[in-house]
Image: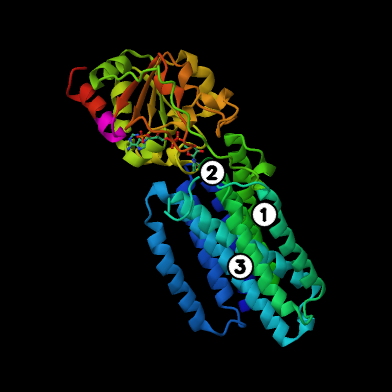
Amino acid sequence: MTHAIGQLGAIAATALFIFSLLWMSDPKTARRGVAAGVVGMTIAVLATWIQPEIVHHAWILVAIVAGFLVGVPLSRVPLTAVPQRTALSHAFGGLAAGLVGTAKYYLWLGEGPELLTKFRMTALVAEVILGFLTFTGSLMAAGKLQEIRWIPQRPVTYAGQNLVNLGILALAVILGVLLIAYPAAAWSGFAFPVVIVLALLFGVLLIIPIGGADMPTVISILNSYAGLAAVAMGFVLDNRLLVTAGALDGSSGLILSIIMCRAMNRSFTNVLFGAFGTVQVAKANEDQKEWKQESPEGAAQLLEQARLVVIIPGYGMAVAQAQHKVRELYDQLTKRGVTVKFAIHPVAGRMPGHMNVLLAEAEIPYSALVEMDEINPEMPQCDVALVIGANDVVNPAARYAKDSPIFGMPIIDADKAKTVLAIKRSKKQGFAGIDNELYVHDKTWMLFGDAKGVIGDLVKQFAGGGLH
Ligand code: NAP
């Protein structure tokens, strides 16, 4: 009976995970998607817990309490820290898979080497290598994104790096294959920890040469590794639910990495083998070019006279939490008959969908949000491009500067608009650490300051100030 309930629970949980992914792919149904994922996971835990072979209930309670102790604070991080939070989740997933694989190996080795079949050993080796490399790789990625002092933010590269990295991975795989062939040989119990150490080391070395601009892609690749580790764990534990959940996790991570590779114009194999991360050399802005400044009054006049205004939000809007003020500006402009569209770059901000989430929070209609490929052909007709805390995603150097770390990344064509207004606090560079000629373009006017404050000043011009 409990077995049948368990099977039914597993089917229900799998269906909910699939619907969860489907619903999360659209902002309108995303909340439902999250709820479906939570319900699916609860069913999965309960359906496993009621099985008769589970006897140590106290340990399960300890694990659940530990999960809450870590999970609740993690859920409270600000939206801007979600990428590193996600990396931490992958680290925990990888660690869990690695530890379960290790425990199972030594348990079976002690109980009787005949239990270590070729199939189980293959799954175990895959689980342990993927799990532990995901653990350290994700910790490094989280540390880099959190800008922890002792983890270098910039790519660290040296000659023959790929050879060293691939050599370490190859060594782990060769030892793994030997373990599959001779799981209970006299040396096996010692070789197993060596595989673990090599996987841990590979995870660290994989991330060291990667610069910030590639980090989102790397995080979603680590997501797919964590998923694959869970699939292997499912085979080890003979748990079909883990296999399907891991496969969904792994494939969605893989699909997301491919989408992001395209958005950032990175080749997928290049990212996968860690062969990227050339040191970024910041070049001085063309010194002779001058940064021209505009006042809130002048900027408000420009906006009011426009027919089409395209707002290009970026990371700075998220930092300033300016989305609600942006909504007020949107209302003021549309009230005056100005058409306002939001140009959404796929990697604007610090996580996929970052801008969509913020603008949805401020209840800006979805219909006003336009993807990059659709808005770019309209940019020459745009009277004012209002760049709010975006930098790399509007940097024209991506089109032609072959030595630039963002070369080839598709951008929002802000420079093709008739006039550009750009809001940022200083003359500092964006995430990729390179200058942006857009700001010193003849048609660009800067509004220096915190995005929330500057947009607030613009709104005041419309609401209470000079413009009616
Ligand atoms: P960005 O290149 O990081 O530039 C953000 C700009 O916002 C900065 O130049 C900064 O200039 C300004 N800013 C910061 N705080 C501000 C505030 N309070 N008020 C006004 N301006 C503020 O951002 P982006 O154009 O959105 O590009 C995203 C970058 O992040 C890309 O390189 C992408 O590859 C990378 N990335 C993306 C993801 C993702 O999944 N979306 C994840 C990780 C990394 P000041 O300091 O002068 O104010």
Position in image of residue 448 (x %, y %): 30, 28
Amino acid type, mark 1: Asn
Position in image of residue 319 (x %, y %): 35, 41
Residue at horizontal 46%, vertical 49%? 145
Q: Nearer the viewer, mark 3 or mark 2?
A: 2
Which residue lies under the disc numbered 3?
A: 97
Which quarter of the frame holds ligand 1?
A: top left
Q: Would you say 32 lies left or right of 404 here?
A: left
Amino acid type, mark 2: Gly
Q: Is residue 454 magenta?
A: yes
The reply to whether discs 3 and 2 touch (Cβ–Cβ < 8 Å) is no
Picture quadrant where residue 7 is located = bottom right
Q: Is residue 139 magenta?
A: no
Position in image of residue 462 (x %, y %): 23, 22
The reply to whether discs 2 and 1 touch (Cβ–Cβ < 8 Å) is no
Say which quadrant the C terminus sits in: top left
Above or below for 442 versus 81: above
Looking at marks 3 and 1 on the same chain, the residue that comes earlier in the sequence is marked by 3
Residue at horizontal 51%, vertical 23%? 396
Which residue lies under the disc numbered 1?
A: 165
**Is most of the magenta stretch helix, strand or loop?**
helix
Tag 1's secondary structure?
A: helix
The residue closer to the viewer here, 138 or 153, is: 153
The residue closer to the viewer here, 247 or 169, is: 169
Q: Would you say 398 lies left or right of 183 here?
A: left
Looking at marks 2 and 1 on the same chain, the residue that comes earlier in the sequence is marked by 1
Amino acid type, mark 3: Ala
Magenta span covers which residues? 449-456
Which residue lies under the disc numbered 2?
A: 211
Residue at mark 3 to residue at mark 1: CA–CA distance: 22 Å
